[in-house]
Structure formats: C-alpha cells, structure tokens
Image: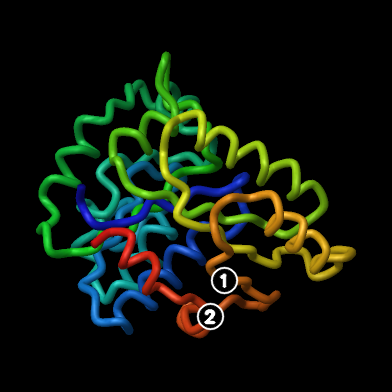
Amino acid sequence: MRRGLFVTGTDTGVGKTLATSALLHALRAAGEAAQPMKPIAAGAERRDGHWVNEDSVALAQAAGFGLDSLEEITPILLREPMSPNIAADREGRRIALDAVIEGLARVPRERFVVVEGVGGFMVPLGEGLDTVHLAQAMALPLVMVVGLRLGCLNHALLTAHAIDAARLPLAGWIANAIDPDMLVPDENVETLRTRLKAPLLARFPWQAPPDARALAALIDVQPLVGTNA
C-alpha cells in the first residue's frame, strides 16, 4: 500500500484545505517528503493566463511546491464552484478516475501523499460515480475533518458510518472550530470521542484568518506515519 492519507470532510466548508495544509506542514516538520493532491477541484480563476483553484494553490504552498506543479496536484479542474457532476455537465465534460489514478502512480513511492477530497464523503461526480469511489480507488487511510457547528454530531457519525460501509480505514479525525459562537463545543467533541472508533488527531481553535502552519503544531503525525509504515 502506498504511504499517504485521504482527507475527507463531514460537509463542504468544514476546513479540509486547512487541515490538509496543516498535515503537510506537520509531515514536513517530521522529516517526511510530503506530496499534495487535490485530484478533483470545482472552482477556478485566471492567474497569469492559467486557470487555477485556490485550494490547490494553498496545498502547493504548504508542501513547498511551485505553482508549476498545479496540474499534477489537480489533474481534473472544473471552472465553476459547484458539485463536480453539475460543473462537468456544464462544461460538456465527463469525469473519469483514470487521470487521478495515473497522477497518483507518477508520485515517487518514497513520498507521503496527502490527498484532499472534494466536498463531503459522498459527492456525485457523474452517473454511477461519486467521491466514495474516488477514495476507494486511491486506497489510502482516511482522515475526517469535522466542522464544529450545530449539526456536526449527525454529520460526523453519518460520514464515519459511510466510510465504514465503504470498507475504508478511518485513521483519525480533526475537530475544526468553524463557528466561534457554537454552544457547548467541548461537549460535542467529547460525544464524538466516545462514539467514533478512530482517534482525535487534533482540535483546531477558531482563527481569523486561519494559519495552517501554526495549527500543524497541534497534530501528532507519528501515529499516521506509523499506520503507513
């Protein structure tokens, strides 16, 4: 099995890119050669004559990669910020996982791959295809990002159930404070501690703006590296 992680979320907007960037910083600080991937991205802007996704740019920067690596990081880039199946239809495209698998195969085996999924765990990509199939095709242990806000318990437990049903290993989860006014966040985190089978890897406090490099210090990546040994 290739060494790496697949970062998924309980929903969109819960901080997957922040968590993935923090993991990249933490792995590099631990001496790992970390390789980012965001294989499918929806939402792009023009920069210097090229279409780029801001999340892919953030991952490249966290890994110390130049912007010339963006096509390797994101082999499937859709221009409009919406569900990938809809964005692809509007561009007259069909999403297939061949380009993703080929991109992963090109990553040197000694590198630790950190993959950021798209949206939540079960986002449609096309007819008969969703992000569960993406995670299964990449065959990496999962890290689940839980956005701490009202409803997060249901979202986290349903996502964990779906991961288990997909026969994928959940290596751990990250609690990310996305609502500074959330009531009883400690109690919510403790509830998830008692119900989720995987360990809590880090709890990110509310930050505006968030600092992935600083948050990296909160993550103990040794158990994750050990899982992939």
Report helix, strand or loop for mark 2: helix
Residue at 49%, 76% (x, y): give it: 219
- Crowding around mark 2 (Cα neighbors within 10 Å: few <14, some 14 to 19, many 20+) is some
Q: Residue furthest top?
A: 127
x, y percent for residue 227: 33, 60
Query: Residue 106 or 173: which is nearer the viewer?
Result: 173
Q: CA distance from mark 1 to mark 2?
A: 6 Å
- Say if mark 1 contacts mark 2, CB within 8 Å: yes
Q: Quadrant of the C terminus?
A: bottom left
Report helix, strand or loop for mark 1: strand
x, y percent for residue 183: 89, 64
Residue 218's tag is 2
Residue at 58%, 41% (x, y): give it: 160
- Residue hosting label 1: 202
x, y percent for residue 72: 20, 53
Q: Residue furthest right?
A: 183
Determine whether 83 is above or below 74 in the image.
above
Horizontal side, residue 141 vs residue 163: left or right = left
Horizontal side, residue 65 vs residue 197: left or right = left
Amino acid on which the number 1 mark rests in the picture: Ala
Amino acid on which the number 2 mark rests in the picture: Leu
| Colour scheme of the picture | rainbow
Q: Quadrant of residue 98?
A: top left
Determine whether 33 is above or below 189 in the image.
below
- Crowding around mark 1 (Cα neighbors within 10 Å: few <14, some 14 to 19, many 20+) is many
Query: Residue 133 or 60: which is nearer the viewer?
Result: 133
